[in-house]
Amino acid sequence: MPHEYILQTQLPVGLPEILLAANSVDPDYGIRGIGGTDTLQISLPDGLPLVTILPSAELSRRVDPITLGASATEHSERFWTEALAPWESSPRDVAVLLERVATACKGRVTANRQHLSESRS
């Protein structure tokens, strides 16, 4: 089962932000589209997938902060972007990459708290 991350941002996550973040972490990462959709996958230099980022969805209504997590009090976070990492992906590498994407889009990353804690160790 893949690890799921959520990016909550003020701006939609797009190709430019993903390219810049991937290049800043490892210039040898690859980026490819998935099946003619707006879904993008960042791959390791050997071609294995690191993380798949789905298209951003604009939040159409305000959601109770308890639903999104206790820290979700920013009303300016308008976009929800899901990212899926294979079980064998390095949690630290995925977290660093997604945090850079989220920062570029003026937001933050949320995920399984244990998984984020492990990635920062």
Image: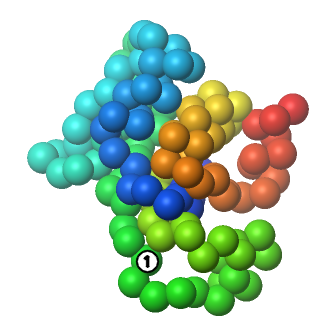
- Residue 3: percent from left, percent from top: 59, 51
Q: State left or right for residue 71 relative to residue 31.
A: right
17 left or right of 2 in image: left
Task: Please report the residue visible at 69 percent of the width from the left and 82 percent of the height from the top.
Answer: 65
Residue at x-position 75% and y-position 48%: 115
Res 30 seen here? yes
Tell me what residue is drawn at x 41 percent, y 37 percent: 17
Residue found at the very far right of the displayed protein? 121
Residue drawn where x is 46% and y is 88% of the image: 61
Foreground: 85 or 62?
62
SS class, disc 1: loop
Q: Would you identify the image quadrant in which residue 93 lies?
A: top right
Q: Is residue 48 left or right of residue 86?
A: left
Vertical comparison of 104 with 11: above or below: above
Q: The disc labelled 1 sits on which kind of residue?
A: Leu
> Within 10 angstroms of label 1, few (less than 14), some, or many (20 or more) residues?
few
Q: Residue pushed farthest front?
A: 76
| Residue 101 left/right relative to 46 | right
* Colour mapping used in the image: rainbow
Q: Quadrant of residue 72?
A: bottom right
- State the image coordinates of residue 40 (x, y, percent, origin top left): 31, 41
Residue 5 visible in image = no
Location of the C terminus (image quadrant): top right
Residue underneath mark 1: 59
Residue 66 at what x, y percent from top left?
Answer: 73, 85
